[in-house]
C-alpha cells in the first residue's frame, strides 16, 4: 500500500512556542491530505482538510489561526500549532488518499506534549 | 452529515472466544467502509475494507466483516481471538463524494490469556 510519513514522531515544547508537523506522501501524489487529532483512549477527530494550491478547510470548532495548515506541494502538508498550550497536547495524525483510490493511508502520528 | 456508531466501548474476552464488534453508520449516499486496529502505543493499521462486491470481506489476522446495506452495518468478526488481539478497534466510513473519513468512537478489546 501507499506510504505516508510524519515528522517528527514526538515533540516536546514549552508553552507559547510554535510547533510544525510535516506529513509526506512518499510514493504517490496527494492533492488532498487530512489532519486528525486523537485524545487518549478516544477516536480520531478530523481537524481540517489540506488542499494543494488553496486554503485548508477547517472543521467546525477548529481554530484556523491556531492550527495553520500549508499544503506546499503534492507530497507535503504541514500543520503548525501556534502558541502551543498544554491543552494542545495530543496525538496528531495525517492521512492522504491517492488520487486513484477512495481510501486513505495514515501516517504514524506525532505525539505533541506541551509543558 | 455522516456518523459512525460503535456499540461496544470495552469488550473483554478469554482467548479462543469468538468476537463480534458492532458498527453502524448513517449516510444516505455511497460509502466505503473500513476497520482499523491500533495496538498500544502504535499507529493505525488497516484490518479490512469494503468498497463493493461481496459483502463479506476478509482481512488480515483472521478478521472478517459483513456489510449489510439494509441495516447500515459493518460488523467485525473473528472466530477465535488471541491475547495479541488486545487493541483498540475503529470503524470508519468514507463519504465517496467528500472523501473525508468519519470514525467511530472505538472499541477497546482486552483478551485475557
Image (cartoon, helix red, strand yellow):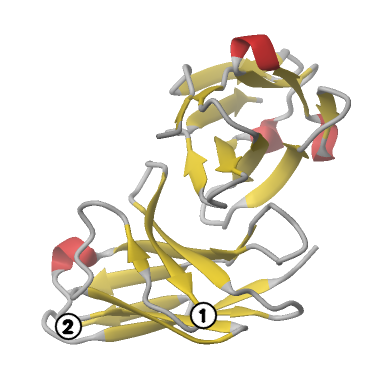
Instruction: Please name the residue that numbered disc 2 is placed on.
Output: A14
User: Between residues A56 and B18, which one lies in front from this camera angle?
Assistant: A56
Picture quarter with the N terminus of chain B = top left
Instruction: Please name the residue that numbered disc 1 is placed on.
Output: A52
Asked whether, in this view, residue A63 is left or right of residue B80, the answer is: left
Residue appearing at x 39%, y 68% in the figure:
A111
- Say which chain tag 1 marks: A
Q: CA distance from mark 2 to mark 1?
A: 30 Å
Picture quarter with the C terminus of chain B = top right
Asked whether, in this view, residue A86 is left or right of residue A108, the answer is: left
Horizontal and vertical percent position of residue B14: 65, 16
Horizontal and vertical percent position of residue B5: 46, 24
Give the answer, above or below, for where B104 lies relative to B9.
below
Local crowd size for mark 1, using a 10 Å CA cut-off: few (<14), some (14–19), many (≥20): some
- Disc nearest the viewer among 2 and 1: 1
Give the answer, above or below, for where A21 lies relative to B31.
below
Circle nearer the N terminus (2, 1): 2
Amino acid at each position: 500500500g501507499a506510504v505516508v510519513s510524519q515528522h517528527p514522531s514526538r515533540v516536546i515544547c514549552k508553552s507559547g512556542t510554535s510547533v510544525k508537523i510535516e506529513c509526506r506522501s512518499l510514493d504517490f501524489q496527494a492533492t488532498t491530505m487530512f489532519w486528525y487529532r486523537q485524545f487518549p483512549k478516544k477516536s480520531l477527530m478530523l481537524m481540517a482538510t489540506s488542499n494543494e494550491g488553496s486554503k485548508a478547510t477547517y472543521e467546525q470548532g477548529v481554530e484556523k489561526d491556531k492550527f495553520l495548515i500549508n499544503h506546499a506541494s503534492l507530497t507535503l502538508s504541514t500543520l503548525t500549532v501556534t502558541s502551543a498550550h498544554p491543552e494542545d497536547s495530543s496525538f496528531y495524525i495525517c492521512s492522504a488518499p491517492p488520487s486513484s483510490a477512495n481510501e486513505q493511508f495514515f501516517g504514524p502520528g506525532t505525539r505533541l506534549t506541551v509543558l | 452529515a455522516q456518523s459512525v456508531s460503535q456499540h461496544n466501548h470495552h469488550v473483554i474476552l478469554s482467548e479462543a472466544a469468538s468476537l463480534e464488534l458492532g458498527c453502524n453508520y448513517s449516510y444516505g449516499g455511497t460509502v466505503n467502509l473500513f476497520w482499523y486496529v491500533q495496538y498500544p502505543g502504535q499507529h493505525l493499521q488497516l484490518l479490512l475494507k469494503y468498497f463493493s462486491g461481496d459483502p463479506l470481506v476478509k482481512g488480515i489476522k483472521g478478521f472478517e466483516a459483513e456489510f449489510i446495506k439494509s441495516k447500515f452495518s459493518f460488523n467485525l468478526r473473528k472466530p477465535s481471538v488471541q491475547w495479541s488481539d488486545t487493541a483498540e478497534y475503529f470503524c470508519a466510513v468514507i463519504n465517496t463524494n467528500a472523501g473525508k473519513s468519519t470514525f467511530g468512537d472505538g472499541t477497546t478489546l482486552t483478551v485475557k490469556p
